[in-house]
Image (spheres, rainbow, N blue to C red):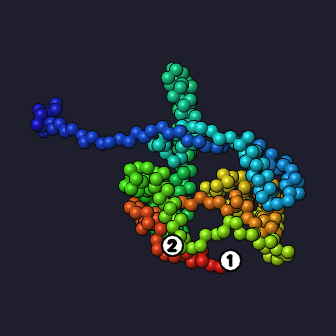
Amino acid sequence: MLPNIRRSDHGAVVMTPKQRSTDRGEDVTVVVRSQDANGRALLCLALKETDWTPLYHMDTCVEMTEAFYNTVIGLLDYHLPLLTVKRHTTDKPWVTDQFRHLIRCRQHALKTGQTARYRAYRNRVQRMLNTLRRKYYARKMEGLRVSTPRSWWRSVKQVTGQTSNNSQPLIGLANQLHDGDVQALADRVNRFFQGVAADLNPLDDNSTPLPPPDVVPDEFVISLEDVEHKLSQINVHKAPGPDSLPNWLLRDSASHLAGPVCAIYNASVHEGYVPFRWKEANVVPAPKVQPPRDVEADLCHDTIRDAILTCARKPT
């Protein structure tokens, strides 16, 4: 106890606050694709002006597929190149590159003593912060009225900060099983999923391929209009596949890309051959419990393994 302060009749008590570990995060280097609006517009214009006639005259769907991806990815890399940028692990989910640029300008004006310039950037930063945060929460809350109770609670916990949007449940599993070696955990998960069909006879790569069908039923031939409709309905909020083509590009340029995609698909049906690029997929192990503690038990239930084996044993 210490003497009272001024005229108070109560003694003063000095207490030491409990130290809390503050996660200041760290800077990380990531590779992202440019999101320049002018570049996107020029890319869509370039795809519109692309002449796909040479592709239509190619002999096989493999040649057509390679020509398609070489053209589209080449234009994508030219107008929206990959950039190496720095990010901070504690960045809020609504932070954008434009917002980061305004903050840098504000801080530069503050350090150089440009008072008027600093105040102008400070106001712009505050306005953009409010706008980005409001849009982020509005997007998160959209659809909660018709969602299931489980989805509702999950979204509310994410928005209120009770759970992290960038949580990585497999990191703990890597720390537990492989001393934090994520690559070793990935190899183990890969071996586990490969072992699901270990009792099946492997395909013979040296076997003689079946001849292409003489006549393809009309029900297996797709039209240009069907392809354009499907491309225009792609969900742009989902991650792209192994081909790295952004979903927004396929949707926004559906009318320009429908022709070559339709030609490749119909050629694949007529030849009885599926291009390798179209057979690739990104397989993400989704934990069935939180946090996962075992690869075999928590990343794939017995019912899922049975379903995989059932599909694998079906005659073609």
Asked whether residue 160 appears in the rendered view, the answer is no
Residue 219 drawn above or below residue 79:
below
Marks 2 and 1, how far apart in space? 20 Å
Q: Which residue is mark 2?
A: 305
Residue 243, picture quadrant: bottom right
Q: Which three-letter amino acid code belongs to the residue tagged 1?
A: Thr
Q: Quadrant of the C terminus?
A: bottom right
Q: Where residue 184 sits: x, y (%)?
A: 46, 53
Residue drawn at (42%, 68%), measured in percent from left and top? Answer: 297
At x 16% / y 30%, what residue is drawn?
Answer: 6
Q: Earlier in the sequence, mark 2 or mark 1?
A: 2
Q: Is the residue 224 above or below the residue 176 in the image?
A: below
117 versus 100 height, above or below = above
Secondary element under disc 1, as helix, strand or loop, is loop
> In the rendered image, which quarter contains the N terminus?
top left
Marking on residue 316: 1
Percent coordinates x, y for residue 101 in the rendering:
58, 34
Give the percent coordinates (x, y) of residue 103.
Answer: 53, 33
Residue sitting nearer the eye, 149 or 121? 149
- Camera-near label (2 vs 1) is 1
Left or right relative to 22: residue 159? right
Q: Are marks 2 and 1 in contact (CB under 8 Å)?
A: no
Q: Residue at x 65, y 79 (%)?
A: 315
Q: Quick check: 60 left or right of 165? A: right
Residue 313 in view: yes
In front of the other: 85 or 301: 301
User: Which one is in front, 121 or 160?
Assistant: 160
Give left or right: position of 118 versus 293: right
